Amino acid sequence: MAEHLTDLKPGESATIVALEGGRGMQARLRRMGLVEGRPIRKLSALALGGPVVVMVDRAQVAVGRGLARRIEVRRAGDG
């Protein structure tokens, strides 16, 4: 079953598996460092639709919840 960045709890690590959506949206996420195969760690998520903050390549990146739902991930330790 596919999981998305929004499914992770703060502190959990994962690897980006796929970016869903159009080319423009994918390019935007890649410019932010969110690239397939890259490990990330979810730092926090604000309630009520606020942004999701992740650590990627020693940088904190805030992503809107709508975009975060389009980032497919595999949790660390999952085959």
Image: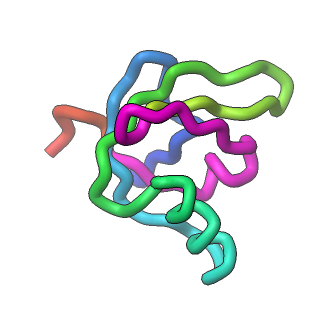
- In the image, farthest residue toward the bottom: 23
Count of marks overlaid on the render: 0
Q: Is residue 72 above or below residue 7?
A: below
Closer to the camera, 49 or 78?
Answer: 49
x and y, in percent, of residue 57 in the image: 36, 40
| Residue 79 point in image, percent of width and height | 14, 45
Where 63 falls versus 9 (above or below)?
A: below
Residue at the far right in the pictured view: 48
Farthest front residue? 58
Q: Position of residue 48 (x, y in %)?
A: 85, 25
Residue 62 falls inside the magenta stretch:
yes
Camera-side residue: 7 or 45? 45
Rendering quarter of residue 52: top right
Q: Residue at x 31, y 37 (%)?
A: 75
Residue 65 in the magenta stretch? The answer is: yes
Q: Residue at x 51, y 64 (%)?
A: 30
**Left or right: residue 52 compared with residue 76:** right
Residue appearing at x 17%, y 33% in the figure = 77
Left or right of 79? Residue 20 is right
Q: Quadrant of residue 62?
A: top right
Coloring applied to the structure: rainbow
The spot of residue 7 in percent (x, y) is 53, 34
Q: Is residue 51 above or below residue 11?
A: below
Decide if residue 70 is on the left or right side of residue 18.
right
Q: Can you say whether 57 is above or below 72 in the image?
A: above
Q: Report the span colored magenta.
A: 56-74
